[in-house]
Image (cartoon, rainbow, N blue to C red):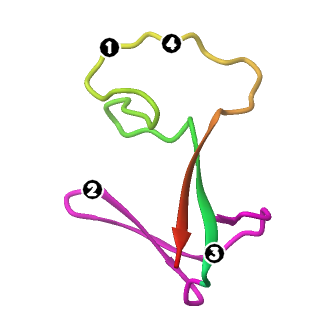
Amino acid sequence: MALGGGALVSGDISIGANEREWRFTPKEPWSVGAYQLVVLSILEDPAGNRIGRPFDVDAFDRIDPSGSPERTLVPFVVK
């Protein structure tokens, strides 16, 4: 996890609910502020489902030769 300024938030992840949930628990309590979760496009499940595209759709994407995966940013705010 990264703060708005790019600092990383240390913590632990866990998988739950029949592998349908991903949880992040920070080592320290959340501070008030803006955060963003950075998800790389190479993250996928065994069926090939990835963030940023519909599940259960046959897609024969070209392989990106750049070696740098796309990033999906998921912003959120702790009040």
* Part of the protein shown in magenta: 1-30
SS assignment at label 1: loop
* Position of residue 5 measured from the top left corner of the image (x, y, whole percent): 79, 64
The answer to the question of whether label 2 and label 1 lie on touching residues, with beta carbons closer than 8 A, is no
Residue at numbered disc 3: 33
Q: Estimate the spatial distance between the alpha carbons at disc 3 and disc 1, rounded to whole Å.
A: 39 Å
- Disc 1 marks which amino acid? Asp
Q: Residue furthest front?
A: 79
Magenta span has 9? Answer: yes
Image quadrant in which you'd find residue 6: bottom right
Image quadrant in which you'd find residue 65: top right
Q: Quadrant of the N terminus?
A: bottom right
Q: Earlier in the sequence, mark 3 or mark 4?
A: 3
- Disc 3 marks which amino acid? Gly
Q: Earlier in the sequence, mark 2 or mark 1?
A: 2
Mark sitting on residue 19: 2
SS assignment at label 4: loop
Q: Residue at x 57, y 10 (%)?
A: 62
SS assignment at label 3: strand
Q: Taking 46 as reference, is 63 above or below it?
A: above
* Position of residue 3 measured from the top left corner of the image (x, y, whole percent): 70, 67
Q: Residue furthest left?
A: 18
Q: Estimate the spatial distance between the alpha carbons at disc 3 and disc 4, rounded to whole Å.
A: 37 Å
Residue at numbered disc 4: 61
Other residues around mark 3 within 10 Å, as few (<14) / some (14–19) / many (≥20):
few
Residue at numbered disc 1: 58
